Amino acid sequence: MSDDEVIAAIIDILVRNEPDIISAALRGGLSGERLGRVAPNAFGYIVETLQSDLDASSGTGEIHLPDEAYANGDIATAVPVLGAGAWRFLVAHVKGEQRIAMSRVADRFFAAVYRLERAIVAGLMDESRQSSPGLDRRGAIAEALIAGRPLPEAGLVDGSATDGYVTICIGFSSGVDRRACLHRLAVAPRWQHVLPAFQEQDLVLIVPLDVPTAAQEITAIARETLAEMKIGPMPAGVAYALTDDGVSEAVEEARMIMQVARSLDYPHPYVLEDVCVEALLVRSPDLAARLGQRLEPLAARGGYLLDTLRAYIASGRRRVETATRLHIHPNTLDYRLRKVKTLTGLSITSVRDVQTLSVGLVAWQLYDQSGDD
């Protein structure tokens, strides 16, 4: 059998056994009433995508799907699970030479499923589909909350009350497609009520909470949100608003935190308590410059003394741990720390001096960057 004949045979097996494959997927990974409702459509799209792979006129397996496939995030969730479930069914039920032939096209099968998922999630067939009516409505709600205006129409997308909001301001790097990242989040079932707003090069996300949330959980929510967007490490500020009226102030706080994180190359989401010292220095550039200048003599020696000091403070001033981290002998560490005292007049045995050195390292990073500009 040729590979095309094997794919055609797979399509026939899938069509004949659709109810059993969907039933198994619902038991194994597609839990939930909403996913159960979209499973038949998602399964049909997989079959159509495989069929398109056989269409010689398209050459690239072009996918033609109805608009609802691009607007329903549950379908994007169902496609990869159903694809894996379909292949498990084939492995369990196809025997003999046909099974051997089938193994030759495994990569082709999963490439088709992946191509379908990407087409739905990122709107690859039509860029305008990256902005669905539901996403536009959520954006309008976000803009109203940020501006302190009354919410449009019935308020939140699902009309439910909230127990506050987590506001997240993400500072995107140049070249990153913010809208594609947002679409990946928008189609994830857990995050379909996130309210987005684009502001210059940044993206603000407002996450309505359905239960009271402890302060320590806010950063975790932000980390999960960024992970769902698959954007890698990026600076982000996070703040909490208890009511609609508090969202505007929370967004400003989140933006300020993000700007601090971006200034210092901090690549994760932070709340204000995480970066209080850094925020004070960013808001007081003269003070930051003055503190940073105290460490200039260390930088003038090539930077290794700054690295030594940074590692020593980060380790909690543990001598052996610091030496191990730097791959140097403890006696070499002692020598370098004495040089720090000689050049700065600040001793690592004085609690007050250590505080100055610790804050000075942050100030030096800000001061050094401003000097480079």
Image (tube, rainbow, N blue to C red):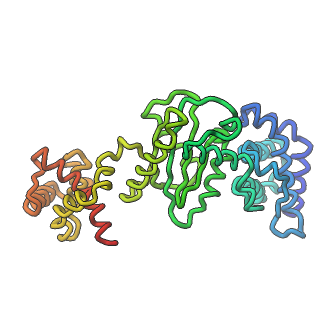
| The residue positioned farthest toward the top in the image shown | 212
Q: Residue 34: x percent and y percent? A: 76, 35
* 44 displayed left or right of 158: right
The residue sitting at 59% across, 58% down in the picture is 178
* 33 displayed left or right of 210: right
The residue sitting at 28% across, 66% down in the picture is 368
Instruction: State whether residue 218 is above or below residue 258.
Output: above
Report the front residue among 286 and 303.
Answer: 286
Name the quarter where the C terminus is drawn. Answer: bottom left
| The residue positioned farthest toward the front in the image shown | 149
Report the front residue among 97 and 239.
Answer: 239
Q: Residue 59: x percent and y percent? A: 84, 70
Q: Quadrant of residue 302?
A: bottom left
Name the quarter where the N terminus is drawn. Answer: bottom right
User: How many callouts does the rendering have?
Assistant: 0
The residue sitting at 55% across, 29% down in the picture is 163
Residue 37 seen from this side: yes
Q: Residue 42: x percent and y percent? A: 81, 45
Instruction: State whether residue 79 is above or below residue 343.
Output: above
Q: Residue 355: x percent and y percent? A: 18, 47
Report the front residue among 99 and 298.
Answer: 298
Residue 225 seen from this side: no
The residue sitting at 57% across, 40% down in the picture is 207
* 52 displayed left or right of 272: right
